[in-house]
Image (cartoon, rainbow, N blue to C red):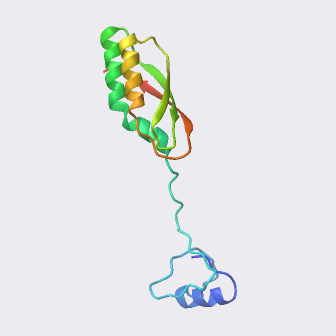
Amino acid sequence: MRATRGLGCVVLMLASGCGGSEASRPAPAGATVPSGTIATPTAPSPPSSNPDADAVEAARSSLRACFDKARSANPALGRTTVTLSLGVDQAGHVSTVDLEYKHRFDDASKSCMRDAAFAIQLPAGQPRKVEVPLTFDPR
């Protein structure tokens, strides 16, 4: 809790003794918080994650199956990165898919990856372009 000088110090004096420091402390049960005083958390909240990237990451298993298909067609295919560039509408549906491959994939694997990308459901919101690189390692 953050106190202002004057009346706020009286409340803190009753609650915590007003011991010279204005450290943020939660008010004890039953303490009165003066109007206009804003209670703030003592620890900062963790940074929020990127919900679009999280949605793409949640689809990794279906995208991984396409990479495995590409490895079956080309066993020499090693670690590779595929960058998904997705056009997303207001409802969170993928409307366009562009894929950038670091290494060459066969057409069937490209089609598989494109279909898996179209199936991703992203959070609703403003129409946007989402770009997420995914790296796949051979098993």
Q: On the picture, is 50 further left or further right than 138? A: right
Q: On the picture, is 76 further left or further right than 81? A: left
Residue drawn at x 56%, y 38% is: 128
Quarter placement of the C terminus? top left
Q: Quadrant of residue 56?
A: top left
| Horizontal and vertical percent position of residue 26 | 51, 77
Quarter placement of the N terminus? bottom right
Q: Is residue 67 above or below residue 107?
A: below
Q: Is residue 34 above or below residue 131?
A: below
In front of the other: 135 or 65: 65
| Horizontal and vertical percent position of residue 138 | 34, 19
Q: Quadrant of residue 129?
A: top right
Residue drawn at x 36%, y 8% is: 76
Q: Is residue 115 above or below residue 3?
A: above
In front of the other: 103 or 116: 116
In front of the other: 80 or 67: 67
| Horizontal and vertical percent position of residue 54 | 44, 41
| Horizontal and vertical percent position of residue 19 | 60, 84
Q: Quadrant of residue 2?
A: bottom right
